[in-house]
Image: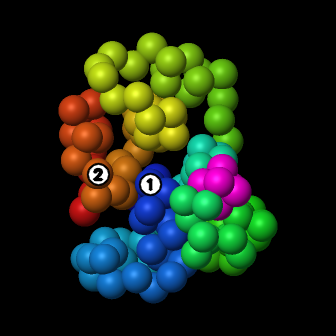
Amino acid sequence: MKLLLDTHAFLWWLDGDRRLPPRVRRRIEDPATVVLVSAATAWEITTKARIGKLPGALAVAADVAACIVSQGFTSLPISVEHAQRAGALPGPHRDPFDRMLIAQSHAEAVPIVTLDTVFDDYGLTRIW
């Protein structure tokens, strides 16, 4: 099983935040699960930390790659296919980070771990 973490799910995992449901936490912890963290998540964390929207994530923003590796997760690069899919997505949702995660979830045929119900509008398998 593979899972793609939305940015908040990744940060909540790192923080041990109780908003991440125990059922979801168990799926992430399962040794048979390959947990993917998108380059878009690194971009989002770093951008939002820089502009003050994620003041609690400054340490993560300083080295997102090391945080991914420290958890045994796998980085998911952004490919040209991912970028093209994200740009072509229909609908009013304008968040570029979410659009990339939606495109990657589709392209890689992997469920996404997110609380955000807007992902449901794009025919994804959402784990929460």
Classified by dominant secondary structure, the portion drawn in magenta counts as helix
What label sits on residue 6 in the rendered view?
1
Does the residue at mark 2 contact the one at mark 1 (Cβ under 8 Å)?
yes
Circle 1: residue type = Asp
Q: SS of the residue at dot 2?
A: loop
Asked if 19 appears above or below 41 in the picture, the reply is below
* Residue at the spot of label 2: 116
Which quarter of the rendered picture does the C terminus lie within? bottom left
Asked whether, in this view, residue 99 is left or right of residue 74, the answer is left
Q: Amino acid at mark 2?
A: Asp
> Are there few (<14), some (14-19), or many (20+) residues within 10 Å of tag 1?
many
Residue 74 lies, in percent from the top left, at: 63, 59
Q: In the rendered image, which quarter is residue 114 located in? A: bottom left
Q: Which residues are magenta?
A: 46-51
Position of the N terminus by quadrant: bottom left
Residue drawn at x 29%, y 20% as measured from the top left: 91
Q: At which x and y percent is residue 96?
A: 51, 33
Residue in the picture at 29% in, 41% down: 119
